[in-house]
Image (cartoon, rainbow, N blue to C red):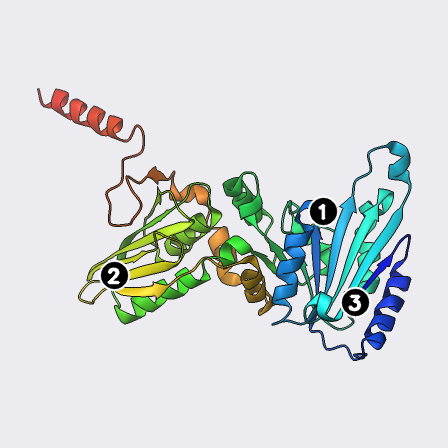
Amino acid sequence: MKIDLTETTSSKINQALISARRDIGSPAVGMVLTLVIVTDEENAYDALKAANDSSREHPSRIIVVIKRVSRSPRARRDARLDAEIRVGSDAGSGETVVLRLHGELANHAQSVVLPLLLPDAPVVAWWPEDAPADPAKDPLGALAQRRITDTYSAEHPLDELSVRAATYRPGDTDLAWTRITPWRSMLAAALDQQPAQVISATVEGESDNPSCELLAMWLADRLGVPVERTLSGGPGLTAVRLETKNGVIVLDRPDGSLATLCMAGQPDRAVALKRRETAELLAEELRRLDPDNIYESTVKFGVERLGGPTEASSVGSGQKRQEPAGAAAPAAKKAAAKKAASK
């Protein structure tokens, strides 16, 4: 069921929700959280589809906030709220309210959203695109216990990682971090099977991919070893190589779907490591609403401490990599100086 309301108020929206639930024969509210999505018209459809899919695992009230920027000064002074209500099969396993805020009202979105939050239920805020620099201080982010951003959607993802580190507050998280959960689980399981001291590591993947940087920072932070970041044609993360005292552990995924785990003294194994859809990532984040201390430690480690990534000669962790530009020059100068000193 869909209900359109124009020039409405939060009170009328709540009344319409109660009437709609009564009309479809489900007056009881069995939702576990409120998910507030802050987006624009261009990305609203995809974000809402992902949220509806994830609501099958986490029944929730989904509130989509779309701020309609007015072009003329007169239109900007006119405040208006339009709403679209969806319940039943049109709203996944919960209910959906799409809010379009016009004019000056766009600057006071928290006042519109606050009366629509489920009572005594956690609130999660999600910015699919254009997240604020400090989500916890954003008026809508301040209403939430959990704040989800996605550095992959930023124009400069690596710079965005530095912003996330500088403004981190307990409850912040990032879908770029969620994307590497299967990689982290697989690498941890491999080290459990073959316990050995890790000497160094290499992470290979696309340029400007924040998930690759986060995985490299996670390895450097948790293992305390140097981690080299190399580039490949993707898709996404393509390989991780761990040098240990007992041999090499390689997790290679050249096609974005099926990976191969290679460990010294053991046969190669094919493992499923498919790139996941946004709905799966969102569902994973909604499973836990407490602060993610491992993400905090990783993002604060700092991209700059990894050094610049180098080009890989071909996709696949077993291939040799090219040296970064200018790397041979210092070595040549040092050899020449040593030769001159010996004369």
Residue receiving disc 1? 41
- The crowd level at tag 2 (other Cα within 10 Å; few <14, some 14-19, many 20+) is some
The residue positioned 89% from the left and 45% from the top of the image is 79
- Tag 1–tag 3 contact (CB < 8 Å): no
What's under tag 3, amino acid-wise? Met
What's under tag 1, amino acid-wise? Glu
Question: Residue 158 or 74: which is nearer the viewer?
Answer: 74
The residue positioned 46% from the left and 51% from the top of the image is 211
What's under tag 2, amino acid-wise? Cys
The residue positioned 17% from the left and 27% from the top of the image is 335
Quarter of the image holding residue 222? bottom left
Q: Position of residue 166 (x, y in %)?
A: 57, 46
Q: Is residue 291 visible?
A: no
Q: Earlier in the sequence, mark 2 or mark 1?
A: 1
Residue receiving disc 3? 1
Say which element carries label 2.
strand
> In this image, 169 relative to 321: left or right?
right
Q: Position of residue 227 (x, y in %)?
A: 34, 49
